[in-house]
Image (cartoon, coloured by chain):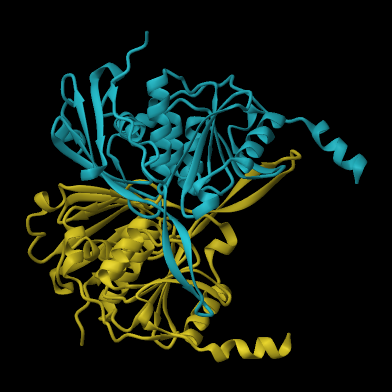
Chain colours: A yellow, B cyan
Amino acid sequence: MAYRPELSSSSAALTREVEVMDERGRVSTINIPAERPLTVYVDKRELVTLMTLGGAPEALTLGYLRNQRLVRSLEDIVSVQVDWSVDAVAVKTRNGIADVEERTAKRVVTTGCGQGSVFGGLMDEVDSIVLDPDARLTQSVLYRIVDTIRVQQSVYKQAGSVHGCALFSKDGEMIYFVEDVGRHNAVDAIAGKMWLDGLDGHDKVFYTTGRLTSEMVIKGAQMGIPFLLSRSGTTQMGHMVAEKLGMSLLARCTGKHFLLLTGKERLIYEPGLFDDARRIA
Amino acid sequence: MAYRPELSSSSAALTREVEVMDERGRVSTINIPAERPLTVYVDKRELVTLMTLGGAPEALTLGYLRNQRLVRSLEDIVSVQVDWSVDAVAVKTRNGIADVEERTAKRVVTTGCGQGSVFGGLMDEVDSIVLDPDARLTQSVLYRIVDTIRVQQSVYKQAGSVHGCALFSKDGEMIYFVEDVGRHNAVDAIAGKMWLDGLDGHDKVFYTTGRLTSEMVIKGAQMGIPFLLSRSGTTQMGHMVAEKLGMSLLARCTGKHFLLLTGKERLIYEPGLFDDARRIA
């Protein structure tokens, strides 16, 4: 049986109701995302505070440690215990984080909505990542994925102001769906779930509601995923890093529309998909 | 004459053209935001790397240092020199940054799109901030502000994927408009411009396209601004911190619509604004 650290199971209420007044002075209530601070302690040492919706705090913590390359193997983690009464999570490792001071010293403030921080050195890893050149995605599976997202129940539909990320199989089956106020935290939670379930990324597709920035591309690449889809756009750094990595980036994915930016050879076009439309029109 | 550090003047091209293929295999080009890494060196010591569009790198650098409370007075800064050939900016201070190691050690990873990092200690400052209780904003000035944003030329309209922030006077005149891939960087650039021009925030209004998260509220409060407007929504932490600070938050601002969340006493309703509509309708 695959190893699993001891985990708490502490998802929290995802929305909260607040009173508002509109332009005509009418009072009503709306739901807003229940963003909370989660301070991560590793072997009693405070590492970072993550602002999160709280839907998957254990997976988020694990995914954060993995994506920051602070822990190499799941077996290195003994336990992850979340305690919302103190907005904290305590991680126990088997042997401590090697060179933790040094490795958490260099901050790169990434885009996100301004100041995302990736511990320096991760950008350097980019040079050694190889994404599966033979992975393929058909246009119909792409549309299946986009449509699955469209009908997905979500906090976003209730309360706005959150980002959603999802992992799909190459046949377009949704494996995980995670929302968080911060897109990078949603990605990290998915990375944590993949780690726990022993899933590899080479034959998966990643969907995000957020922009295809350099950090999103790097995270996806670290997770070994060759396809990154978004309904939003991309940036120069995101495009440049994706090209360097040979990742397939598809932006502006809505309905039948998309823009294929990089890694174009992996998408299998199916022109026949549009024939029905022409016959009906 | 007011003191001004020695500044380079190094804005860079804001968009870049890339080739794309759409759902029918048609090839065309689109403009994407030209996001770049800007590594900040203070007195030759590497501090952080900011991902930015590059429209106002000197102001961004100054505003970052100010909003992180790493430099107290503009007179402490001797020069800010940006060099895009090495994606870096060199800041010279008069006396160094006091306790720089200690003050940059504690990281709080904020929302943004996941991993915004605010140096610990800033959250504590929140308790001591007092925003002008007598500041007032009329409904017509609010609409003037929203409409000014609507017609503003922008990278966003060309290329998407960027956030815009603007500072307005209490009469609804736009003072600064800054776009960046990251919202926090756009705010910091505005803070930098205010610092250079000696502007106080107590009689100003801040508009952002991004969500009203706790970091946006804290930044606005640090800048002494009592009004924070967005066309987007808010989160629980943003709402909570705004309530604590007595900041006036207005979410979902589009056309004539808005949701007034906190600091409600500062908005002056003008019911007569809707009379014309009723007569015409």
Viewer-side residue, A39 vs A216: A216
The quarter holding residue A240 reads: bottom left
- The location of residue A19, given as percent across then percent down, is 63, 45
Q: Position of residue B37 (x, y in %)?
A: 28, 48
Where, quadrant-wise, is the N terminus of chain B in this rendering? top left
Q: Nearer the viewer, residue B47 or B30?
A: B30
Residue located farthest toward the top when viewing the structure as drawn: B1
Which residue is more in the foreground, A172 or A45?
A: A172
Q: Residue at x 59, y 21 (%)?
A: B135
Residue located 87% across and 37% down the image = B276
Can see residue A26? yes
> Residue A67 at what x, y percent from top left?
24, 64
- Location of residue A136 with respect to A156 vertically, above or below: below
Residue lying at 34% horizontally and 75% vertically, measured from the top left: A263
| Quarter of the rendering containing residue B207 | top right
Locate residue A197: give its quadrant: bottom left
Q: Is residue A13 shown to the viewer in this render?
A: no
Question: Residue B240, image x and y in percent?
Answer: 48, 41
In the image, taking residue B134 as reference, residue A197 lies left or right, namely left
User: With respect to residue A176, does A92 lie above or below?
Assistant: above
Q: Is residue B51 left or right of residue B197?
A: left
